Image (cartoon, rainbow, N blue to C red):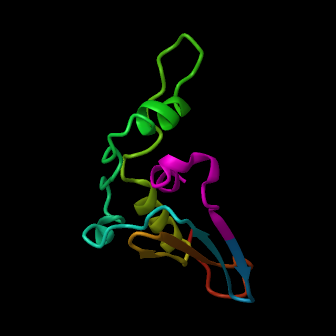
Amino acid sequence: MRATVESHLDNLNHLPDIVVTISNNDVDFVIRVSDRGGGILHSIVKKVFEYSFTTSGNITDDRVDGGLFGTITQSDYTGPAPGSMHGYGFGLPCSKAYSEYLGGQLTLETLQGIGTDVYLRLRHVDGKRESFRI
């Protein structure tokens, strides 16, 4: 979502859809999340599954962190303000680790300048086939 908004800042009233597709068969199911957020640069695509790698903060437009995403994490209560909810570089690596632990996989296909499709494939946990160890 963040990439979609950041790559369409001049047209926020007409953002392209983020499409989620869920498919199922006898062995596994796949969840695909497809965006048109500009894709991932070829020079960094291999780094996105590395812990602590982030592209957050690369855009200096005030409409991003000082505006829309900056206000998402703010609260009206008088206690300490919550911190950023993104940009730590743990979302994709942790998701990939969990999916592999569960016998699945997390992969992505990206078209630089267009968008990215992320595929989460997980086996059914029904006891009919080899499962993961708890």
Give the residue furthest to the top.
78
Percent of width and height locating residue 21:
69, 73
Residue 101 is a magenta residue? no
Percent of width and height locating residue 110:
43, 74
| Closer-to-camera residue (95/55) | 55
Magenta region: 1-20
13 is higher (above) or lower (below) than 72:
below
Quadrant where the N terminus sits is: bottom right
Quadrant where the C terminus sits is: bottom right
Q: Quadrant of residue 20?
A: bottom right
Q: Is residue 50 left or right of residue 122?
A: left
Q: Is residue 107 left or right of residue 77?
A: left
Identify which residue is drawn at 61% across, 60% down: 16
| Closer-to-camera residue (57/98) | 57
69 is higher (above) or lower (below) than 24:
above
132 is higher (above) or lower (below) than 56:
below
Q: Is residue 118 left or right of residue 29?
A: left
Identify which residue is drawn at 65% across, 67% down: 19
